[in-house]
């Protein structure tokens, strides 16, 4: 069913939630108050405690910070908070935009592992937009390669990961022992099969 021109609260009630790039937490509210805002479209307040417990189970760091204003927690904790807030809406589909942006590699791995668990254990479908192709393909089941706003290649994550052009252009990998010069790399567009 098309969702364009729908009221955002109606889209959320239909089970589609977006976690925007840059986290966008309510800095003046506490961690727990931020989480509670995630359930604003829900009519039944009885399960909020149960839902908070679920979020705190997946993101135990937030349990310790529940009374802290969101503006004073780390970037990684803010990303966890943004995902937890989305989870409070009981999404069937979570649109996740650049969750690795500005985070240390260890935090990125932790967040991606949690998102992967949410997909498996809570049956939340995830549509991820991510420039860190290496990490994204490690956790994805299916992938799409976009060039200037259009999809130029798609397939299961393993097939895309093994594509030689993808390895070179997006994963920074070349043949064993080979190093590419900048001159070779800057002319890569000529060799992209999907652009011809």
Image (cartoon, grey):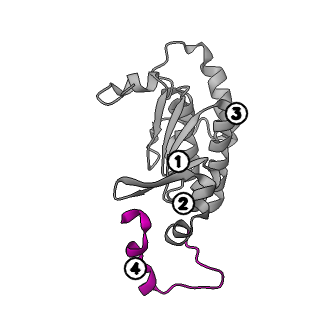
Q: Is residue 26 above or below residue 108?
A: above
Disc 1 and disc 4 in contact, CB within 8 angstroms: no
> Closer to the camera: disc 4 or disc 3?
4
Disc 3 and disc 1 in contact, CB within 8 angstroms: no
Q: CA distance from mark 4 to mark 3?
A: 43 Å
Residue receiving disc 1: 72
Q: Is residue 147 left or right of residue 164?
A: left
> Closer to the camera: disc 3 or disc 1?
3
Which residues are drawn in magenta?
A: 171-196
Name the residue at 49% across, 26% down: 15
Q: CA distance from mark 1 to mark 4?
A: 42 Å
> Closer to the camera: disc 1 or disc 4?
4
State which quarter of the image contains the C terminus: bottom left
Name the residue at 33% across, 25% down: 7
Residue receiving disc 2: 133
Residue receiving disc 4: 186
- Seen from the viewer's position, the closer of residues 39 and 153 is 153
Indicate the quadrant where residue 114 lies.
top right
Indicate the quadrant where residue 92 lies.
top right
- Seen from the viewer's position, the closer of residues 89 and 171 is 171
Q: Residues within 10 Å of mark 3 (few under 14, many from 20)?
A: few
Q: CA distance from mark 3 to mark 2?
A: 24 Å
Is residue 39 located in the magenta-colored stretch of the structure?
no
Name the residue at 60% across, 13% down: 46
Residue receiving disc 3: 121
Query: Which element is circle 2 on?
Result: helix
Query: Which element is circle 3 on?
Result: helix
């Amino acid at each position: 069913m098309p969702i364009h021109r729908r009221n955002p609260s109606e889209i959320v009630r239909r089970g589609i939630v977006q976690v925007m790039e840059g986290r966008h937490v309510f800095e003046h509210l506490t961690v727990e108050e931020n989480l509670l805002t995630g359930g604003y479209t829900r009519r039944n307040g009885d399960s909020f405690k149960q839902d908070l417990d679920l979020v705190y189970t997946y993101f135990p760091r937030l349990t310790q910070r529940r009374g802290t204003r969101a503006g004073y927690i780390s970037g990684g904790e803010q990303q966890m908070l943004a995902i937890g807030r989305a989870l409070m809406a009981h999404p069937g589909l979570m649109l996740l935009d650049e969750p690795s942006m500005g985070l240390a590699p260890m935090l990125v791995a932790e967040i991606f592992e949690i998102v992967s668990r949410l997909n498996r254990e809570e049956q939340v479908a995830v549509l991820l937009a991510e420039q860190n192709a290496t990490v994204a393909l490690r956790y994805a089941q299916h992938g799409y390669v976009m060039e200037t706003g259009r999809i130029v290649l798609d397939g299961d994550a393993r097939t895309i990961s093994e594509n030689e052009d993808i390895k070179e252009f997006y994963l920074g990998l070349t043949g064993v022992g080979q190093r590419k010069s900048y001159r070779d790399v800057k002319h890569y567009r000529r060799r992209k099969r999907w652009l011809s």
